[in-house]
Image: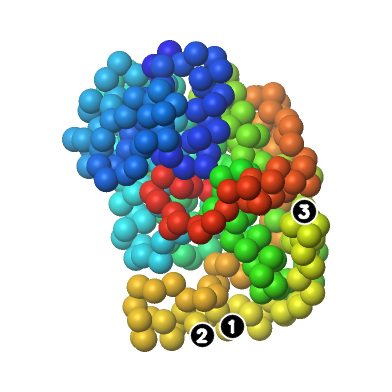
Amino acid sequence: MRTLITGASGLLGGHLITALQARGDDIHALALVNEDTSALEARNVTIHRGDIRQPETLTSAMEGVDLVFHLAGMMGFWLPMSDYYAVNVTGSENVIRKAMAAGAKRIVHISSWTVYGMNIGQPAREDFPMQPFYEPYAVTKTEGDKAVQRLIAEEHAPVVIIRPGTFFGPGDRLHFARMTDRVVNGSGIVVGNGNNALPFVYVTDVAHALMLAAENPDAVGKAFNITNDEPITQEGMLRAIAEEMGAAPPRIHVPYHALYAAAWGAERVEAVVKPGRQPIVTRLGVKLFGTDNRHSIQRAREVLGFEPQVPLREGVRLAANWYRESHKTAPKPTLAQVS
């Protein structure tokens, strides 16, 4: 099977490639013109240069494709909403339309748990209203999700939408490494009382769900939450990292509302002093780590046969092993990194 992955050089893409190679797929990847693809090429992945924001650059990559995994997205940049929209909304539409034109039989689109909003008071199901926190990533992933739903409804696009939790594991410099940095250097804090559930899921569980979504005939046209529904609390996550790293867990608790107000102030100051630079603390970061977020995976269980395979505590151990062995300096995220 000829399979194309956008965002293949990101954390999820690397683990998905492992699963696809195990079943013998002919794997192709779409990469930006200046993107370092040496690691992908070393794994015998065929590289096509293009940009999802420019649909004319996607034609050759889509030629003869059977299956497309659209993982590419913008995350982790302190950029205007318009930049995020071009990638997460327009870019997603471009990928799906080009894949359909090329005759792809199945397209798996990565959305996000943030489409539901945060701290909604109960486990979110796929039919819950979309009420994202107003910041570029969450808003544009929501709009991208809606655009894909329209393509399914109006143009019969053969798409499965996956809304994963925040995935982590070996190679995760965007989330796990940053948390571990703070624990190791003693700068970590607990937002609020720390008893809130964090929507983490181990990366190989998400890769497994993508494979199920690509294979199951009943999945087309549906959206699925993919996470671990035995979540870990904020304080539990920090303590687990500390245990694995032989460090003291963070003991300073900062009240949620006070930190949120401080983040609001920091954002306003940076907007005046140095526009475009990310503040040291943001409202999104406070909400991500300080609110309770749970998601139902009942539909994924019933339709896809999905079941989390890696307990989150075990995932922390595996990710910490990677951190100890290979973490040096966390590079800036790229368009290939999604959550």
Q: Earlier in the sequence, mark 3 or mark 2?
A: 3
Identify the residue shown where x is 53% and y is 30%: 16
Q: Is residue 234 above or below residue 148?
A: below
Mark 3 Cα shell of 10 Å, populated few (<14), some (14-19), many (≥20): some
Instruction: Give the camera-side residue of 100 and 186.
Output: 186
N-terminal of the pair, mark 3 or mark 1, is 3
Relative to 264, residue 56 above or below = above
Distance CA(mark 3)–CA(mark 1): 33 Å
The residue depicted at 54 percent of the width and 26 percent of the height is 18
Q: In what element is the residue under mark 2?
A: helix
Q: Is residue 68 left or right of residue 200?
A: left
The residue depicted at 48 percent of the width and 47 percent of the height is 338
Residue at the image point whose x is 56% and y is 18% from the top? 22
Task: From the top left corner, tell me how far across and down residue 101 is, in percent.
Answer: 27, 23
Q: Are marks 2 and 1 in contact (CB under 8 Å)?
A: yes
In this rendering, is residue 263 above or below 90?
A: below
Q: Which mark is residue 261?
A: 1
Separation of marks 3 and 2 at Cα, in angstroms: 35 Å
Gap in Å between the C-alphas at discs 2 and 1? 6 Å
Residue type marked 1:
Ala
Camera-side residue of 23 and 186: 186
Identity, as a three-letter code, of the amino acid under mark 2: Gly
Quadrant of the frame with the N terminus: top left
Residue annotated with mark 3: 244
The x and y percentages for residue 166 are 61, 49
Residue where numbered disc 2 is placed: 265
Secondary structure category for the residue under label 1: helix
Kindly indicate the quadrant of the structure image that contains residue 45. Answer: top left
Q: How would you rate the neighbour count of disc 1 (Cα within 10 Å): few for under 14, some for 14-19, many for 20 or more?
A: some
Judged from the image, the secondary structure of the residue bearing numbered disc 3 is helix
